[in-house]
C-alpha cells in the first residue's frame, strides 16, 4: 500500500513537471496554430539564463526564475517579428522546417557560447532537501514543481476563459479577419500570446531542470515528449493538457517501477490507445 | 598541361611512402553533436602528446587527419574509414568513441594494411574482430570488476544492480555480478533502465523495496548521471545508508561541477582520474588543458588518446615509416611505459592495455573544486571480459 502511494506521488510530480514544460507548446499549437518545434529550445535558453544568474552570478533562485522568463521573452521578440510572423497560417510543413531550423541554430549557438557541459541551477535553500509526508520522504523541489503546475494551470485557464484578452485571443484564432474587422489588433494579440508561450517554456525549463538537466541537446532530446503531451491532451486545451500529463505521468512512472526493462513501451502504448479513441486528443476541438 | 599535372600526381601517389615523408594518422571521433566534448578530449590528448614529444618520428612528419562522426553510426564510420585509407592514404587509424563504429571498420584493416588504435570504445569483443587492433582505453569489464571487491571488503552482502539498457550497461552488470558472486555476495535484483530514462524516482523506490544494502549503477557519462545521483540523494537512500558503487563513467570530471555536493563520497573504480598524482600526469594535464582551453572539460578520453599516440609513435619507430600493419602491431605487443594514469603495458595476447584500476572517492578540494580522489589501487588489471566475449 505504501508503495502505491509512493508511486502516486512520484507520478503526480512527474506529470506536473511535464505539464509546466509542455503547456507553452500547447498554447502555440492550439491557439496560434503554429507547430513550434523550437519550444524546447526556448525552455533550454531559460535554463541557461537561470543557471548563469543563480550559479555564476550567485543572485539566488527566485531572481534566476524571473530573469530566465524575462530574458527569454526578450530574445524571442525579435525572432517572432522576423521569423514566426511569416509562418502564421502557413502549411504545417513550412512551419516544421522553419522551427526545426531555429532549433538547430539555438543548439549551435548555446553550445558555442555556454560550452557542451551540463549546467545546474542551484535551488533556493528552502527548496533543497526532502520533506517527510508521513509514509515517505519526497524532495521539497517536487512539491514546489507540483504547486507551480497547479498555479500555471489555474492562471492560464483564468486568462483564456475569463479575461478580456482571452476573448480577443480566441476571436483572433477562430477568425482573424473578422476579429480584425471588429477592432481587435490581432498582431498584438499574437505577439503577446507568443511571448506568454515562450515565457512558460522558459519557466518550465527552469522548474523542470531537476528532471531534465540543461545541456545543449535539451531542445532535441525532449522534443518528442512535449509533442506527445500536446497531441494527447488536445492542442490548446489547458484541462486537456493537464489530464494528459497526469495520465501519462502515472502510466510512465508505474511502468518504470514494475517493469523498467520495457522502457517507454507503456508510455507509447497509452499514447496509441488514447489517440485511437480520441483522435484530436482528450479535449481536442473539432476543426 | 592538365594531363601532365594528373600524371605527375599519379606518379607521386604511386610512390607511396619513402623516407622523410609525411605519415598520416586518421582519427575518427565525435567532434560535433551531443558527444562533442568527448571528441574534444580526443583532440586535446593528441595535441598534448604532439606538443610534448614533437610532431616528427625519425625523419618522418606526423600529420593528423580528423573525421567527424557525431553519434554511433556504423555505416558512416565504415565510409569514413575507407575514405581515410583510400583517399587520404593514412597509415594508421585511431580514435573511435563508440563500439559499433570501431567494429564497422575492423574488417577493412587487413586489406588496407592499416593498424587501428582504439582510444575509447570499451567493449571487449572488438579485439576479436581483427588482429590489427590495439586498444589504449579500458573496457567496462575492466573497470567494473574491482568495485565488487570494494563492496565485499566493506561487508556488503546484498546488492541491487541498476544499469542503462545498452551494450556497456549489460557488460557492467555481468562483470559486477560475476566478480561479486565470486566473493560470496548476492545480487538481489538486476534492473535495466532504458537509456532515455529521465525520472529515476520509481527506480529508487525499487531499490528501497529490494532490501539491498547497496546499489551498483552504470549509466553513460552525461546528463542522465546527474538525475540519477540527485534522485538517489533526494529519495532518502543516501540518508538511509545505502551504499553506492559504480565504475567511473558516472563521475567523469566534466560532469562533477554539475553534480557538486550531491556526488560527495561516491566511490567509483576507473583507470584514470585527472587528479592522479604523478609527474607524468602533471605534464599531461598542463599540456592537455592548454589544448582543450578549459580545465573543467578535461576527462578520461584524453588520456586514451594520449597513450594511443604513444603507441602509434612506437609503431612508426619500429617500421621506420614504412607501411606494414602486421609489423607495427607486433612491435607494440608487450610494450611497457609510464602513462599519465600510471604504469601500463599492451597485453601481447589481447592487444588490450593492462593497467592499474583505482578506487576513487569524490571529494571537495580546499579551493572548492570537486575531484575523484584515488584512495586504493588495483594493480595490473587485464580485461576479464575477453574470455566471455562472443
Image (tube, coloured by chain):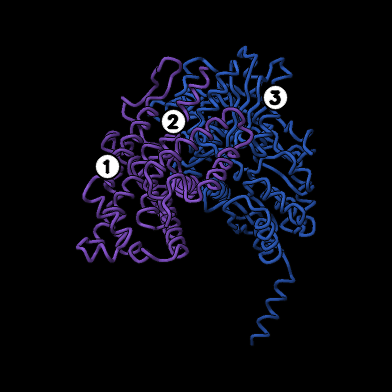
Chain colours: A purple, B blue
Badge 2 vs badge 3, beta-carbon distance below 8 Å: no
For the N terminus of chain B, the quadrant is bottom right
Q: Is residue B243 left or right of residue B293?
A: right
Q: Position of residue A187 (x, y in %)?
A: 26, 62
Answer few, some or many: residues within 10 Å of disc 3's Cα (few below 14, many 20 plus, some between 14 and 19): many
Chain assignment, label 2: A
Q: Position of residue A274 (x, y in %)?
A: 53, 43
Say the numbered circle drawn on residue A158.
Answer: 1
Query: Against A96, is B363 above or below?
Result: above
Query: A100 or B355, which lies in front?
Result: A100
For the residue labelled by badge 3, is the local secondary structure a helix, a strand or a loop? helix
Q: Residue at x 77, y 39 (%)?
A: B350
Q: Both on one chain, marks 2 and 1?
A: yes
Report the Cα–Cα distance between label 2 and label 1: 22 Å
**Which quadrant of the structure image shows residue B214?**
top right
Report the Cα–Cα distance between label 2 and label 3: 35 Å
**Which quadrant of the structure image shows residue A246?**
top left
Q: In the rendered image, which residue does mark 2 sit on?
A: A12
Count up the numbered dots. 3
Q: Is residue A249 left or right of residue A196?
A: right
Task: Say which of marks 2 and 3 sits in front.
Answer: 2
Q: In the rendered image, which residue does mark 3 sit on?
A: B177
| Earlier residue among tags 2 and 1 | 2
Q: Position of residue A255 (x, y in %)?
A: 57, 32
For the C terminus of chain B, the quadrant is top right
Query: A116 or A211, which lies in front?
Result: A211
Q: Both on one chain, marks 2 and 3?
A: no
Report the Cα–Cα distance between label 1 and label 3: 56 Å
Query: B112 or A131, which lies in front?
Result: A131
The answer to whether residue B292 is seen in the rendering is no
Query: Against A106, is B8 above or below?
Result: below
Query: B99 or B13, which lies in front?
Result: B99
Amino acid at each position: 500500500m505504501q508503495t502505491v502511494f509512493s508511486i502516486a506521488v512520484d507520478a503526480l510530480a512527474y506529470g506536473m513537471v511535464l505539464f509546466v514544460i509542455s503547456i507553452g507548446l500547447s498554447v502555440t499549437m492550439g491557439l496560434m496554430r503554429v507547430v513550434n518545434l523550437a519550444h524546447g529550445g526556448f525552455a533550454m535558453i531559460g535554463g541557461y539564463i537561470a543557471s548563469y544568474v543563480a550559479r555564476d552570478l550567485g543572485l539566488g533562485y527566485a531572481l534566476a526564475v524571473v530573469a530566465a522568463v524575462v530574458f527569454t521573452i526578450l530574445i524571442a521578440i525579435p525572432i517572432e517579428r522576423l521569423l514566426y510572423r511569416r509562418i502564421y497560417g502557413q502549411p504545417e510543413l513550412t512551419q516544421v522546417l522553419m522551427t526545426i531550423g531555429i532549433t538547430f541554430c539555438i543548439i549551435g549557438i548555446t553550445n558555442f557560447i555556454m560550452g557542451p557541459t551540463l549546467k545546474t541551477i542551484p535551488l533556493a535553500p528552502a527548496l533543497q532537501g526532502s520533506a517527510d509526508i508521513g509514509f515517505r520522504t519526497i524532495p521539497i523541489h517536487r512539491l514546489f514543481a507540483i504547486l507551480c503546475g497547479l498555479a500555471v494551470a489555474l492562471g492560464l485557464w483564468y486568462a483564456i476563459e475569463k479575461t478580456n484578452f482571452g476573448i480577443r485571443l480566441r476571436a483572433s484564432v477562430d477568425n482573424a479577419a473578422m476579429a480584425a474587422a471588429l477592432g481587435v489588433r490581432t498582431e498584438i494579440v499574437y505577439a503577446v500570446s507568443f511571448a506568454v508561450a515562450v515565457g512558460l517554456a522558459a519557466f518550465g525549463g527552469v522548474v523542470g531542470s531537476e528532471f531534465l538537466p540543461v545541456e545543449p541537446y535539451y531542445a532535441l532530446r525532449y522534443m518528442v515528449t512535449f509533442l506527445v503531451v500536446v497531441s494527447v491532451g488536445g492542442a490548446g486545451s489547458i484541462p486537456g493538457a493537464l489530464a494528459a500529463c497526469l495520465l501519462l505521468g502515472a502510466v510512465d512512472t508505474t511502468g518504470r517501477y514494475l517493469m523498467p526493462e520495457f522502457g517507454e513501451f507503456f508510455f507509447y502504448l497509452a499514447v496509441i490507445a488514447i489517440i485511437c479513441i480520441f483522435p484530436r486528443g482528450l479535449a481536442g476541438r473539432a476543426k | 598541361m592538365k594531363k601532365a599535372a594528373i600524371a605527375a600526381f599519379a606518379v607521386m601517389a604511386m610512390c607511396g611512402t619513402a623516407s622523410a615523408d609525411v605519415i598520416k594518422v586518421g582519427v575518427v571521433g565525435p567532434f560535433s553533436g551531443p558527444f562533442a566534448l568527448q571528441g574534444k578530449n580526443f583532440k586535446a590528448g593528441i595535441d598534448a602528446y604532439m606538443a610534448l614529444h614533437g610532431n616528427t618520428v625519425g625523419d618522418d612528419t606526423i600529420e593528423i587527419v580528423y573525421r567527424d562522426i557525431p553519434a554511433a553510426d556504423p555505416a558512416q564510420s565504415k565510409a569514413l574509414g575507407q575514405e581515410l585509407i583510400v583517399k587520404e592514404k593514412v597509415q594508421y587509424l585511431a580514435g573511435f568513441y563508440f563500439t559499433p563504429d570501431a567494429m564497422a571498420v575492423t574488417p577493412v584493416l587487413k586489406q588496407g594494411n592499416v593498424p587501428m588504435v582504439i582510444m575509447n570504445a570499451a567493449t571487449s569483443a572488438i579485439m576479436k574482430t581483427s588482429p590489427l587492433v590495439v586498444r589504449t582505453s579500458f573496457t567496462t569489464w575492466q573497470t567494473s570488476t574491482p568495485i565488487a571487491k570494494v563492496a565485499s571488503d566493506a561487508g556488503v552482502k546484498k546488492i541491487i544492480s541498476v544499469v542503462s539498457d545498452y551494450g556497456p550497461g549489460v557488460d557492467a552488470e555481468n562483470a559486477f555480478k560475476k566478480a561479486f558472486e565470486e566473493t560470496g555476495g548476492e545480487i538481489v535484483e538486476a534492473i535495466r533502465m532504458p537509456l532515455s530514462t529521465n525520472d529515476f524516482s520509481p527506480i529508487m523506490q525499487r531499490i528501497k523495496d529490494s532490501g539491498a544494502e547497496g546499489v551498483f549503477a552504470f549509466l553513460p557519462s552525461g546528463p542522465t548521471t546527474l538525475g540519477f545521483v540527485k534522485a538517489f540523494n533526494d529519495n532518502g537512500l543516501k540518508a538511509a545508508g545505502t551504499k553506492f558503487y559504480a565504475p567511473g563513467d558516472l563521475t567523469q570530471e566534466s560532469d562533477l561541477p554539475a553534480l557538486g555536493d550531491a556526488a560527495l563520497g561516491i566511490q567509483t573504480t576507473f583507470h584514470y582520474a585527472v587528479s592522479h598524482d604523478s609527474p607524468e600526469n602533471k605534464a599531461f594535464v598542463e599540456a592537455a588543458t592548454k589544448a582543450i582551453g578549459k580545465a573543467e572539460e578535461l576527462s578520461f578520453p584524453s588520456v586514451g588518446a594520449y597513450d594511443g599516440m604513444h603507441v602509434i609513435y612506437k609503431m612508426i619507430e619500429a617500421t621506420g615509416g614504412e607501411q606494414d600493419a602486421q609489423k607495427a602491431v607486433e612491435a607494440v605487443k608487450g610494450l611497457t611505459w609510464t602513462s599519465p594514469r600510471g604504469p601500463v603495458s599492451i597485453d601481447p595476447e589481447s592487444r588490450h592495455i593492462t593497467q592499474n584500476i583505482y578506487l576513487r572517492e569524490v571529494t571537495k578540494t580546499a579551493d572548492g573544486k570537486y575531484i575523484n580522489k584515488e584512495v586504493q589501487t588495483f594493480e595490473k588489471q587485464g580485461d576479464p571480459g575477453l574470455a566471455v566475449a562472443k
